[in-house]
């Protein structure tokens, strides 16, 4: 039977490309989203991928949502923790709400989603968990203390979970994208975007598909020896100038 793959934030941007890539690789995919019904319906119709709506930062919602997905598609063997948000601002002006929103969606979701599927994966001795971190979790970023902390947390989470489950046929890896051409980056002012591109050695933003292909490979049996890894995909930005 085909692997069942859950992609959080799978209706837009990087997640939508990941959902399509996993579908093309033969998985039965469920895409999770939170608020944008219109984008989700458009994606679902175009890609022929079922969508489910819940907040990945809410433990009870995740348990209930995953139960529904598994009822419809079968037990989860691939989990892609991709959903993420930003609430930027200098730390000395950052509110608790900005902190909590970003930590909730980007880091609490690692617990809520992975905890809900890990026991089944351990029983079946097969699983792939792929977590989307960020270059800014590796290097830090002005105005993103909350986001950088959450994304660095994703890396620690990935390594510890990989160690705990390596002998059970489960791999856990993280991908750190650099700047990718999605709605999240489109929200950044044009002059800031230009200055970002100027710091990327390949001279352009990345494409969502360039992250999706890596996720699809990590989900294959061929990637069974790859666990606890942090895969950096940023057009050379990190090694060039941090
Ligand atoms: P987008 O803003 O384009 O899409 C975000 C997706 O996540 C949407 O499907 C959104 O649903 C969903 N989502 C947001 N919050 C929740 C929530 N609480 N519960 C469930 N789903 C939620 O993001 P990107 O594609 O740009 O980013 C994807 C991931 O990659 C994120 O983790 C981001 O931090 C990371 N990343 C992105 C980079 C970039 O340059 N774009 C660079 C490095 C990392 P809805 O449509 O309903 O809002």
Image (cartoon, helix red, strand yellow):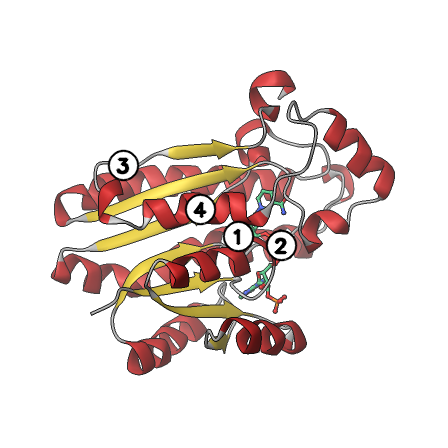
Q: Is residue 116 above or below residue 102?
A: below
Is residue 104 visible in the rendered image? The answer is no
Q: Position of residue 187 (x, y in %)?
A: 77, 51
- Find out if the beta carbon at label 2 lies less than 8 Å from the nearest ligand 1 atom: yes
What mark, if any, has residue 85 been given in the picture? 2
- Distance (Cα) linking label 1 and label 4: 22 Å
Q: Is residue 158 above or below residue 67?
A: above
Residue pictured at 31% horizontal, 36% vertical: 228
Decide: marks 3, 1 in contact (CB < 8 A)?
no
Does label 4 or label 3 sit earlier along the sequence?
A: 4
Give the residue at mark 4.
Answer: 213
Does label 3 or label 1 sit earlier along the sequence?
A: 1
Residue pictured at 28% horizontal, 49% vertical: 220
- Distance (Cα) linking label 4 and label 3: 15 Å
Q: Position of residue 218 (x, y in %)?
A: 33, 45
Decide: marks 1, 2 in contact (CB < 8 A)?
yes
Q: Residues within 10 Å of mark 2 (few under 14, many from 20)?
A: some
- Find out if the beta carbon at label 1 lies less than 8 Å from the nearest ligand 1 atom: yes
Give the residue at mark 1.
Answer: 106
Does label 1 or label 4 sit earlier along the sequence?
A: 1
Give the residue at mark 3.
Answer: 226
- Distance (Cα) linking label 4 and label 2: 22 Å
């Amino acid at each position: 039977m085909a692997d069942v793959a859950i992609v959080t934030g799978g209706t837009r941007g990087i997640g939508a490309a990941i959902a399509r890539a996993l579908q093309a690789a033969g998985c039965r995919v469920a895409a999770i989203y939170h608020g944008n019904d219109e984008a989700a319906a458009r994606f679902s119709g175009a890609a022929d991928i079922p969508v489910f709506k819940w907040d990945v930062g809410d433990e009870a919602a995740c348990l209930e949502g995953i139960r529904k997905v598994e009822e419809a598609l079968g037990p989860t063997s691939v989990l892609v923790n991709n959903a993420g948000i930003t609430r930027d601002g200098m730390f000395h002006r950052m509110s608790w709400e900005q902190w909590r929103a970003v930590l909730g969606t980007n880091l609490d979701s690692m617990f809520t989603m992975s905890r809900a599927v890990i026991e089944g994966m351990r029983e079946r001795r097969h699983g792939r968990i792929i977590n989307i971190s960020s270059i800014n979790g590796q290097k830090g970023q002005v105005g993103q203390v909350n986001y950088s902390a959450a994304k660095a947390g994703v890396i620690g989470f990935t390594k510890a979970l990989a160690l705990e489950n390596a002998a059970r046929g489960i791999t856990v890896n993280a991908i750190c994208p650099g700047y990718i051409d999605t709605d999240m980056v489109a929200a950044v002012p044009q002059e800031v975007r230009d200055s970002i591109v100027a710091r990327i050695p390949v001279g352009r933003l990345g494409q969502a598909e360039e992250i999706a292909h890596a996720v699809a490979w990590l989900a294959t049996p061929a990637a069974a020896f790859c666990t606890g890894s942090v895969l950096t995909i940023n057009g050379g930005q990190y090694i060039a100038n941090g």
